Image (cartoon, helix red, strand yellow):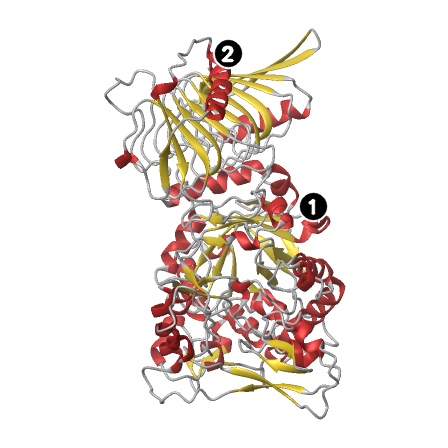
Amino acid sequence: MNAPAHASLDDKERVFDRIIPDKFRPIIDRNACLNCKRCVKECSFGALEWKDDRVVYKGGCVACQRCSAMCPARCIEIATVPSGLPPHASYTERVRQGINAQASSGGVLLCSCGTDMPYGMIFDDLILDAAQVTNPSIDPLREQVETRTYVGRRSSRVMLSGDGYVTESDGSGPVVAMDMPIMFGHISLGAVSYNCQRSLFQAAKDLNILAGSGEGGLHADFLQFADHINGEVASGRFGVTPEYLRRTAAVEIKVGQGAKPGHGGHLPGEKVSDLISQTRMIPLGTDALSPYPHHDIYSIEDLQQLIAALKESVEYRVPVGVKIAAVHNVAAIASGVVRAGADFITIDGFRGGTGSTPRVIRDHAGLPIEVATAVVDKRLNEEGLRNRVTVCAGGSIRSAADMIKVIALGADVAMVCTSALIAMGCQVCQSCHRGLCAWGIATQRPELTSRLDPEIGARRVTRLFHAWNEELKEVMGAMGIDAVESLVGNRDRLRYFGPNQKIAEVMGVKHVGEGWG
Amino acid sequence: MDGTILTKTVVLDGVKETTIDVSGRDQWGRPIDQRELNIEVRKAIGEGADRIILEGVMGQRYIASAATNRCLYIGIKGTPGNDLGAFMDGPTLEVFGNAQDMTGNTMSSGRIVIHGNAWDVTGLAARGGRILVKGSSGYRVGIHMKAFGSSKPSVVIGGSTGDYLGEYMAGGTVLVLGHGVPEAESPVGTFIGAGMHGGVIYVHGRVDEHQLGTGAKLCPLEAEDREAIEELLSDFERSFGMTEERDWERYSKIMPMSSRPFRGRFDPTMVWP
């Protein structure tokens, strides 16, 4: 039942739909069950039904944990069911599942969230340094440890008078101050629900950081958060109006997304509800297609032109950035983007999330954010451009440790998405593209979106990133660093403890055991 | 002559008209920087000008970008640069000369009238307003235009256009009149309406099946199409003081095959961990 029942299959072929059994199954303790039918109501995937006076499992469980979490008797647990397929190390169950599904549907396999392929996390192979003896550590409870971060273009040169005053600086642009080196990535209204986006914006305001608008325009209710919104201008140009450009705190041109480098966006007509239609300014029920490229960008000069047009449109009041997916030539691309005039550049690694993308792209294209950040930082430094631009990096920043490591590898700001959604209830079941999210996050169905209380969502997200910031202070204190700016690109405070020394070389990180000298 | 901008404001019959002369050149003969020009234009808008006349424009870009005053008229003498009226929402721009690339980029509403030719990508991603070009335009005219509610963008090109007309179009109307194109030839290029999923393209002149892009189809002209064309034609006639023939049999109509081109393309089978 995990695979969709294919209408086109005739009775003889239907046997193929039954080869791949369910991976998950809710196990109900019948003695404890109150027969309240709550689980049936909660399961938005239609996996449970009430039949013959009892809850019956129909199939199609995605292990989203909603029934189990909502069961008043706590009598449901989700079990992972062994498939019973003959084991094979190359033709894994996952590979066979894909082949079988495509043989039935002939379609491009869709999926969502970040890739779950076992590539290994380079973050987990990096070890942080700490201060001892000669470079004393700092106690962040007692002493000031600065995590304030600025997004925007820096001055390339500052002139001081004889008595130490700044007399002149050139090339600096508008900046946005954030209380911590974290920003929420672009999660569009459409990909997620109104309540989810509201939670994120409220949290961004409470944390005093930026949140990406995503390519969905900005709902009128969210203009109140505009001071904390990074407005996206993507290839579909949905919702991009003068007011949108004027009121947001920053503007970002989206060229690429880590989960789908080289790919556009595609919001299926089913998800284009009244609310989405109003916000994106497109007709109800039609596909909202963001073209793969921007049709006015075919060169760095063209990108320069769009950046300049946006700067002119915002009257040079807010920074204009560019978001690119981490791909193999990312360092050269980033260099071009900075030369084109971007005030900040966002790099999205290949583990970054998505509300919907072809699985073949999500799982097989791009570059890990750890490597991408390090090579971009290195290249921009070599070319004398690094000090002019803010580098944001995201795509699987799962914890404060990842945030600290990505900063030490060369980012000014860590961009997070999935962690914020997990704080609101997301279980990373990778079903966003089906629009049935039982937690009211990645869905537009009113009965589901109402499950997420934006007040609670905002509170949980705020707590999470407040905690990360405190952890950042703890680590900085332990390293003897008193301002996060001193951690940016500070690879000396990292050591590589992994299987492939070549990765460490590419990133410019020493191996564990190698000292300073 | 030096590189300064000369601004003059007069009020006539309650209409405040600001003339901005940017024909000055700096000591190396270079035209006025676009940024200075646009500051001057914004200043005039801020001071409540009803009409702004730009004299001696020489390729300066982003003129009137993100301008929102609905009653504002900007007359442009010379040649404005790329992204004329980008992100604009309201004003009327009239160019007494040629325009360059991406005229009306992502405009929400307003009106752009060009008495010469417009170069490539005219009307990119527009979601409202009207662009009238007396002459011809280049590649990718009207791409990814979209309509919403009462807001329907329209682009009329008097002459011919290049390839990829109305590519990725999601709404609105494009009309190509084909002035100066012999009857045996087509006033438009190939890959017309490639990937289009909304809106309509009218071409006065020959369009062959092989010129169509993926997802576009030729359709017969209906009564309502004639009404739509009539409205655009009379606006075109008024704007340029011309008279157009109503030879309906010479019109070709191009429509999308589907408003859901991706339906059935994907398989939502769940990923197994």
Q: Which mark is residue A74?
A: none
Left or right side of A279 for A298: left
Considering depth in this image, is B38 or A324 the residue closer to the camera? A324
Tell which subunit mark 1 falls on.
Answer: A
Q: Which residue is mark 2?
A: B238
Q: Which residue is mark 1?
A: A220
Instruction: Report how far apart the C-alphas of labels 2 and 1 lie in the structure.
Output: 38 Å
> Could you tell me which residue is drawn at 72 percent across and 64 percent down?
A458
Residue B178 position within the rendered picture, expressed as x and y whole percent measured from the top left: 34, 20
Q: Residue furthest left?
A: B184
Considering depth in this image, is A428 or A185 the residue closer to the camera? A428
Q: Residue furthest top?
A: B13
Q: Is residue A157 above or below residue A9?
A: above
> Could you tell me which residue is drawn at 60 percent across and 67 percent down?
A437
Disc 2 marks a residue whose amino acid type is: Arg
Left or right side of A449 for A108: left
What secondary structure is found at the residue carrying circle 2? Answer: helix
Considering depth in this image, is A231 or B62 the residue closer to the camera? A231
Residue B160 position within the rendered picture, expressed as x and y whole percent measured from the top left: 33, 23
Tell which subunit mark 2 falls on.
Answer: B
Residue B32 position within the rendered picture, expressed as x and y whole percent measured from the top left: 48, 24
Q: Nearer the viewer, mark 2 or mark 1?
A: 2
What secondary structure is found at the residue carrying circle 1? Answer: helix
Q: Is residue A504 visible?
A: no
Q: Is residue B120 above or below residue A44?
A: above
